[in-house]
Image: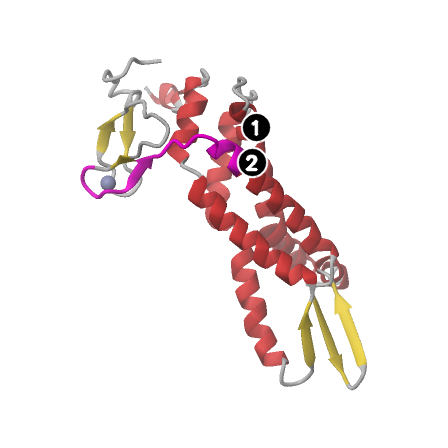
């Protein structure tokens, strides 16, 4: 660990880059409640908050429960002249499990259910020991890096918007009612937004570094020099 105010320009230790404009800043230990902002574009660099990790864990677990509910309960129900049909997401997947649409179903389920669930699990894996003041698990660095890389690929909200648009079209032909799974999905979206608001990536990386893990990817840099 480098002491405060000193830095190594080769490895980037002791420096923090603005995620928006790349301006380099000297890293400082912040007290809980303080906020570090970029001097050039005012983007928040780090914002440690006491209890933030526990809150992110709680939101991730909530998200997992809602995703499980979204898979099991009926997603929507269509009825016309007394004849109705309700289906869950698993039911949709099974309906297409034969024939040439099968790969599409796998991809759909992976993007709207698999990725949000995987991100929630990775966040809990990363933050659980840190929130209790224990040393993090051994694979915490690749786990959190993967979680950050998956962030733009979680498509639950796009799925809900797409479903809503399709339902407006179908509503003219038959009675359509939304099942509990649809609302569970809306809950997942709200929980994810709240979780992202609480998550300060720099603060989590900092906590992992303070626990003695190397996070700067030097294993790759050393191979090239
Ligand atoms: Zn900036």
- Please rate how many residues cluster around mark 1, counting C-alpha atoms within 10 Å: few if below 14, some from 14 to 19, many from 20: some
Compared to residue 191, the image places residue 15 above or below, namely above
Looking at the image, is 21 positioned above or below residue 177?
A: above
- Magenta segment: 39-55
Q: Quadrant of ligand 1?
A: top left
Q: CA distance from mark 2 to mark 1?
A: 7 Å
SS assignment at label 2: helix
Q: Which mark is residue 128?
A: 1
Q: Residue sitting at 23 percent across and 42 percent down?
A: 42
Image quarter in which the N terminus is found: top left
User: Where's the C terminus, which quadrant?
Assistant: top left
Pick the residue in front: 94 or 191. 191
Q: How many marks?
A: 2
Magenta segment includes 69:
no
x then y, percent, for residue 21:
24, 42
Q: Which mark is residue 57?
A: 2
Please say if 210 is above or below 179.
above
Disc 2 or 1, which lies upstream in sequence? 2
The 10 Å Cα crowd at callout 2, few under 14, some 14 to 19, many 20 or more, is: many
Percent from the top left, x then y, of residue 24? Answer: 23, 31
Q: Residue 106 at what x, y percent from top left?
A: 66, 54
């Amino acid at each position: 660990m480098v002491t405060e105010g000193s830095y190594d320009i080769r490895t980037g230790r002791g420096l923090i880059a603005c995620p928006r404009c790349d301006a380099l800043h000297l890293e400082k230990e912040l007290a809980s409640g303080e906020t570090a902002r970029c001097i050039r574009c005012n983007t928040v660099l780090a914002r440690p908050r006491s209890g933030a990790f526990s809150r992110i864990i709680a939101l991730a677990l909530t998200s997992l429960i809602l995703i499980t509910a979204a898979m099991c309960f009926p997603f929507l129900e269509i009825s016309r002249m007394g004849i109705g049909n309700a289906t869950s997401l698993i039911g949709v997947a099974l309906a297409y499990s034969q024939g040439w649409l099968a790969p599409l179903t796998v991809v759909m389920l992976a993007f709207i259910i698999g990725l949000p669930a995987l991100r929630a699990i990775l966040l809990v894996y990363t933050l659980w020991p840190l929130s209790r003041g224990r040393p993090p698990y051994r694979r915490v660095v690749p786990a959190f890096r993967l979680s950050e890389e998956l962030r733009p690929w979680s498509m639950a909200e796009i799925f809900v918007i797409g479903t809503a648009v399709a339902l407006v079209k179908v509503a003219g032909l038959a009675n359509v009612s939304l099942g509990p799974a649809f609302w569970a999905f809306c809950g997942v979206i709200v929980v994810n937004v709240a979780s992202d608001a609480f998550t300060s990536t720099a603060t989590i990386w900092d906590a992992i570094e303070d626990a003695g893990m190397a996070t700067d990817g030097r294993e790759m840099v050393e191979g090239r020099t």
